[in-house]
Image (cartoon, helix red, strand yellow):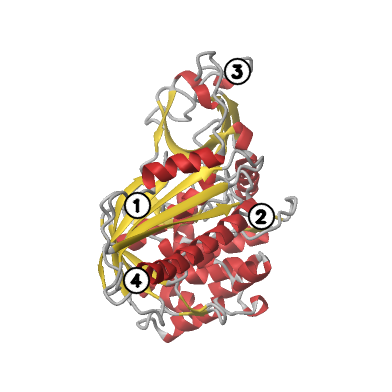
Amino acid sequence: MSSSGKSEEPKPLLTCLETMKRKSHTYDNLPPQMCTSTLVQKIDAPIALVWSVLCRFDNPQAYKQFIKSCTLTAGDGGPGSVREVAMVSGLPSKRSVERLEEIDGDSHIIVFSVIGGDQRLENFRSTTTLHEDHDDRNNPTVVMESYVVDVPWDSNPTDTCDVVDFVIKTNLTNLARIVEKMAAVDPKGDGSFSTVYLATETSCFSSSSISPVTLAVKAVQLKFSDSLKRESRILHKLKGNPYVVECYGVDISSEGSDGPMYNLLMELANGSLTNLIKLYKGNLPEFDVAYYTFMLLKGLSFIHQQGVIHCDVKPDNVLVFNDEEGRSRFLKLADFGLSKSNSDVPINGFRGTPHYAAPESVEQEIQDTPADIWSLGCTVIQMMNGGNPIWKDRNRWELENIPDHISPIGKDFLMRCLAFDPNSRWTADELLNHPFIQDNLRESIPALEFMQSEFCNNNPLSGSWSMTRGLFSPMQGIPMPSNHQSCHQVSTRIPAQVN
């Protein structure tokens, strides 16, 4: 704040970049055997969207096309974490071991060092920062990446920088292409980046006084809530199905300086399919894979019948629910933030996650039910081997890491999911009758369907679809519904930490 009490105007981009370069991208007293360079890339997307891709230390292959796969060998993705990356064929090096030195989501800075592997560039250290361009009314993001590295004994600083600059420039160009396609779906960058909280009841809005109600709450500022509102409409359309996460309603609350917040009140899961895959280290038995795939197919069959295309099927967007004995028994489709419905106004552009996106989605921006089936096939592969689907040849869309140990009927199932021609891909209903499902589950399907339907949660809030105002905090000047007049005083929120 200035002395007059008014907010200071954002500094010009050039000033910000010069300041940041001095602070994070300047290497004083550099030894003669080292060289350095700085590259800049402008991306027409909000900074939150760019950061969501850049900050994933465990998934650099999302935009670095020279990386084939990545395994986190130490840490949880925070400072000190170590990853081992495998390079695509044809490069001089095959593997690199890298350590995350610094990551700050508030300052949008990430720093990593190369600490091992068979690459020739020793003592490599990269620093990447993000900056909002307030000079442009569209507020694009400017990415600045710098590095220092030893000059190999048989090279010189100019040639060394030329090689490294080419790799980094290619990475940043690819980052821009991917994020700008994502931004075409959600221009404000709010749809996929709402915050998830736990909401715990203390004395109110519960249909039972035996135990307090605990919900997952997906929240975003009201002024940026278009995508979350679209998701709530889709979830309302899908409510009551045991294979789709249940949304109990919406709430508008006031959260201090953040202003009005739009909240989706969701059932609380025990984790995600990603957590389950990590627990088994990618070695889920084929029966278990068929068991969980059956549930995903039932969910996809239902939403497709309702005219909804998920558009982002992947392990992160599948929730796991435990039974009374704590076993991971039930899966539900979740996170419909990028989904589209036949009742929606058409939205152009690519949507989804590149590693799970169908060829027609990436190349032609066509998103229909077969695209969900392709993503399901990629998810099944990940259940079997624990790694992201890796492309052998993107021009021919050949997957490289289909597990060798999978049975012939399992491989045939994947072929039906991953047919290049979307018209040749099997539907969810057809896949439910595939031998991979039927032979593995045999006579247990009726019992499984019964257990899943019995598990379907009842709405703990009053009514079948709740709409409240001020559930978490009083909204000034907005009357409270009589049946929720004190709810804002008794509900608390904490950041979600679901294992």
Crowd around label 4: few <14 · some 14–19 · many ≥20 (10 Å) = some
Classify residue 406 as left or right of residue 293. left
Crowd around label 3: few <14 · some 14–19 · many ≥20 (10 Å) = few
Pointer 4 and pointer 2: residues touching (CB < 8 Å)?
no
Q: Return the residue nearer the eye: 114 or 82.
A: 114
Work out how far the residue at label 4 is from the one at label 2, CA to CA, in angstroms: 53 Å
Residue 75 picture location, percent across and down? 26, 54
Establish if 163 lies above or below 238. below
Q: What residue type is labelled 1?
A: Val
Residue 221 picture location, percent across and down? 57, 33
- Residue matched to label 1: 111
- Residue matched to label 3: 482
Q: Return the residue nearer the eye: 389 or 30.
A: 30
Q: Which amino acid does label 3 sit on?
A: Ser
Q: Residue 340: which numbered mark, if any?
A: 2
Q: Residue 364: which numbered mark, if any?
A: none
Work out how far the residue at label 1 is from the one at label 3, CA to CA, in angstroms: 53 Å
Sequence order check, earlier mark of 4 and 2:
4
For mark 2, give the secondary structure.
strand
Crowd around label 1: few <14 · some 14–19 · many ≥20 (10 Å) = many
Q: What residue type is labelled 4?
A: Asn
> Which label lies toward us, 3 or 4?
4
Work out how far the residue at label 1 is from the one at label 4, CA to CA, in angstroms: 25 Å
- Residue matched to label 4: 156
